[in-house]
Image (cartoon, rainbow, N blue to C red):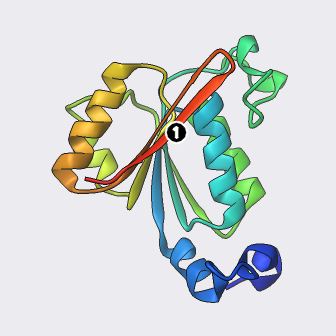
Amino acid sequence: METGRYLSQIAVNEIFPAGQRKMESASVVVIGMGGTGSAAAELLARMGIGRIIIVDNDTIEMSNLNRQALYKEKDIGLKKVTVAERELREINGSIEVEAVDQRLNFSNAVQIMSRGDLTIDGTDNFTARNVINRTSIALNKPWIFSAVEGTFGYVKAIIP
C-alpha cells in the first residue's frame, strides 16, 4: 500500500489502512463519461480504487470542456473512454483502468457490470438507468444513481 499518497484518507477512522486496502482491491464500473461520470472516475482514481472500468461510446465535443475536467481542447473529436483512460492512468499509475467503447444496453450489461463490485451511473437518460437497475438486481450488486438537472443534483445508493 502506497501510504504517502493516501495518508489523509488513511487517517480517517472509518477508513484506516484496512479500508484503504479494500479500496485498492475494489473494482468499480462507471457508466457514462460525461460531467458526472468523468468526475466520479477521476475521484476514484485519486482515492486509489484498484480497478476502474469506464464505459461510453461518445466523442469529446467543445461543449463538454466547461464541466468535464479530464478533457482538453486537443481532445475534441476523440473517444471519451480513450482520453479518460489515458488521463486516469496519469493521475494514478498504480491503478488499472479499462476502457469499454460501447453504449450500455441489455445485450452487454451483464458482461460489463459483472466485472465490478459497484456500478456508478454517469448517464443522462432513464433508459440506461433502467438497464443499470435491472442488471444490478440480476447480479445482486449495488449501484449509485445520479442525475443533474439545471442547478439540482440527485444521488442515491441502491443496494439490491
Horizontal side of 112 relative to 65 (left or right) equals left
Residue 88 image offset from top left, x and y in percent: 69, 51
Q: Image quarter for residue 110? A: top left
Horizontal side of 95 relative to 155 (left or right) equals right
In the image, 89 versus 13, the foreground residue is 13
In the image, 94 versus 109, the foreground residue is 109
Name the quadrant of the N terminus: bottom right
In the image, 145 versus 98, the foreground residue is 145
**Vertical relation: 83 (above or below) 9:** above
Horizontal side of 117 relative to 88 (left or right) equals left
Residue 14 image offset from top left, x and y in percent: 61, 78
The number of callouts visible is 1
Looking at the image, which residue is at 75% across and 26% down?
Answer: 67
- Say few, some or many: other residues with alpha carbon within 10 Å of mark 1 (under 14 / 14 to 19 / 20 or more): few
Q: Amino acid at mark 1?
A: Val
Looking at the image, which residue is at 46% across and 33% down?
Answer: 101
In the displayed image of the protein, which residue is found farthest to the left? 138
Residue 87 image offset from top left, x and y in percent: 73, 46
**Vertical relation: 27 (above or below) 12:** above
Residue 26 image offset from top left, x and y in percent: 48, 69
Q: Image quarter for residue 93? A: bottom right
Instruction: Classify mark 1: helix, strand or loop.
Output: strand
Looking at the image, which residue is at 73% across and 19% down?
Answer: 76
Looking at the image, which residue is at 34% across and 54% down?
Answer: 142
The residue tagged 1 is 155
